[in-house]
Image (spheres, rainbow, N blue to C red):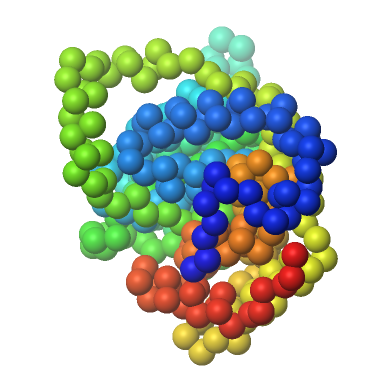
C-alpha cells in the first residue's frame, strides 16, 4: 500500500506554495496539541493516533477490533480531554437495554410530569466497550444516534452534541455470546483499526511513566480545543479541495470493490463519501488544503476493513489488490 512521509512535502504541496500554508496554519497549533495528547496516551502507536485524529476531524465514528488491555479506554479518555468534552462509557452486555444508552422518561411525583433522564449518548466522546455483546435491539439504538446525532424517546426528539464521537470496541477472539454487527450497522463507522502490541522500547517507556502515577493524572489534563473550536475545525476539513481527477479515482476504486469475487458486499455510496471525508482529514493532518491520491490510499485499509467482511490479513490483501487495479491519476 502506498504511503508518504508525513514530514515530506509532495510535488503538489510545493505547487500550492504560501497560499496553502496560510490556509492551514491557524489550525496547526490545535492539531499539534491533539496529536501530542494522543501520542502521550498511546505510546509508540503514532500511526494509530493519526488515524484516530483523521476519524475525529472527518466527523466519523471509530471501531477498534482488538484485544483487551491495549489502551483503547485510555485513548478514548485522552480524546475527550483533548477536545474539552464529556466522556461516557457503556459496558455492552446482553442485558443492556436501549434506554440504558439513550435515556428514559421518569414520572416526577412532585411536578406530576414526566422528566427525561439523559443517557450516556449525551456526551462528546462515548466508549461502547465490546459493542458486539449488546443485543441487536440495543445496537440499533446506538447506531441511530450515530447516524442522525439525535435520539427519539416517546415521540420526542433530542439532539446530540455536534462533537458526538463514538469509539466502539469488539474482541476478535471471544465470539461466544456475541451478536456480530450487520453490514448496515458497520457502515455507520468511518473506519476500523487495530492497535496491536507495542514494541519493547514503548513498553519500557510505559512502565517508567507509570511508576508513581495516579489515576487522576489524566483527569488533570488540560483541553487543547473546546467543542466549538473542534466543530469549526471539522467544518474546515470538510471544505478541503478534492479535484475531479481524485474523485474519479475514488469512484473507480469503489466500483472495483463491487466487482471483485471475494467481496460479498461492495462499497456503498455512503462509504465513498466517508472515504473522501477521511482523506480530506488526512490531507489536513499533512498540512495541505487539497487531497492527493496518496491520501486516498493511506486511509483505504481502515475505511474499507469495516465494510469488507473477512479476516484482517485477508482484507488487507484484498485492499492492496483493489488499489493496484486502478491507475493513479497524474497530479
Count of labels in the image: 0
Task: Farthest residue to the bottom: give it.
Answer: 261
Q: Is 76 rendered above or below residue 306? A: above
Q: Quadrant of the C terminus?
A: bottom right
Q: Is 280 rendered above or below residue 211? A: below
| Residue 248 figure quarter | bottom right
53, 149: nearer the viewer = 53
Q: Residue at x 29, y 52 (%)?
A: 196
**Horizontal relation, residue 238 to residue 169: left or right:** right
**Horizontal relation, residue 107 to residue 147: left or right:** left
Q: Is residue 192 visible?
A: yes
Q: Residue at x 56, y 10 (%)?
A: 110
Residue 237 image point, x, y percent: 71, 42
Q: Residue at x 33, y 41 (%)?
A: 44
Q: Residue at x 69, y 69 (%)?
A: 250
Residue 252 image point, x, y percent: 69, 77
Residue 137 image point, x, y percent: 47, 54
Q: Is residue 120 visible?
A: no
Residue 159 image point, x, y percent: 68, 34
| Residue 288 figure quarter | top right
Task: Farthest residue to the top: give it.
Answer: 110
Q: Is 177 rendered above or below residue 105? A: below
Amino acid at each position: 500500500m502506498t504511503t508518504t512521509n508525513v514530514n515530506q512535502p509532495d510535488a503538489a504541496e510545493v505547487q500550492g506554495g504560501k497560499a496553502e500554508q496560510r490556509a492551514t496554519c491557524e489550525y496547526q497549533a490545535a492539531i499539534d496539541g491533539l496529536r501530542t495528547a494522543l501520542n502521550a496516551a498511546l505510546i509508540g502507536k503514532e500511526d494509530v493516533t493519526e488515524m484516530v485524529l483523521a476519524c475525529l476531524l472527518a466527523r466519523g465514528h471509530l471501531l477498534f477490533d482488538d484485544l483487551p488491555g491495549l489502551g483503547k479506554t485510555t485513548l478514548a479518555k485522552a480524546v475527550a480531554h483533548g477536545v474539552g468534552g464529556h466522556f461516557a462509557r457503556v459496558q455492552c452486555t446482553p442485558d443492556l437495554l436501549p434506554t440504558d444508552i439513550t435515556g428514559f422518561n421518569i414520572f416526577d411525583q412532585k411536578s406530576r410530569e414526566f422528566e427525561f433522564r439523559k443517557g450516556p449518548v449525551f456526551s462528546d466522546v462515548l466508549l461502547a466497550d465490546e459493542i458486539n455483546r449488546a443485543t441487536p435491539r440495543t445496537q440499533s439504538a446506538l447506531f441511530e444516534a450515530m447516524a442522525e446525532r439525535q435520539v427519539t424517546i416517546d415521540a420526542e426528539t433530542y439532539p446530540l452534541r455536534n462533537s458526538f464521537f463514538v469509539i466502539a470496541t469488539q474482541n476478535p477472539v471471544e465470539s461466544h455470546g456475541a451478536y456480530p454487527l450487520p453490514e448496515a450497522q458497520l457502515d455507520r463507522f468511518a473506519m476500523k483499526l487495530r492497535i496491536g502490541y507495542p514494541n519493547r522500547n514503548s513498553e519500557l517507556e510505559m512502565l517508567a511513566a507509570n511508576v508513581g502515577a495516579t489515576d487522576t493524572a489524566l483527569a488533570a489534563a488540560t483541553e487543547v480545543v473546546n467543542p466549538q473550536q473542534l466543530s469549526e475545525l471539522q467544518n474546515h476539513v470538510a471544505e478541503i479541495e478534492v479535484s475531479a481527477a481524485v474523485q474519479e479515482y475514488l469512484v473507480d476504486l469503489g466500483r472495483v470493490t463491487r466487482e471483485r469475487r471475494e467481496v460479498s458486499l461492495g462499497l456503498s455510496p455512503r462509504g465513498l463519501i466517508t472515504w473522501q471525508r477521511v482523506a480530506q482529514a488526512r490531507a489536513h493532518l499533512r498540512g495541505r488544503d487539497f487531497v492527493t491520491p496518496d491520501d486516498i490510499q493511506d486511509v483505504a485499509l481502515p475505511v474499507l476493513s469495516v465494510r469488507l467482511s473477512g479476516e484482517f490479513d485477508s482484507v488487507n490483501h484484498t485492499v492492496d489488490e483493489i488499489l493496484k487495479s486502478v491507475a493513479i491519476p497524474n497530479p
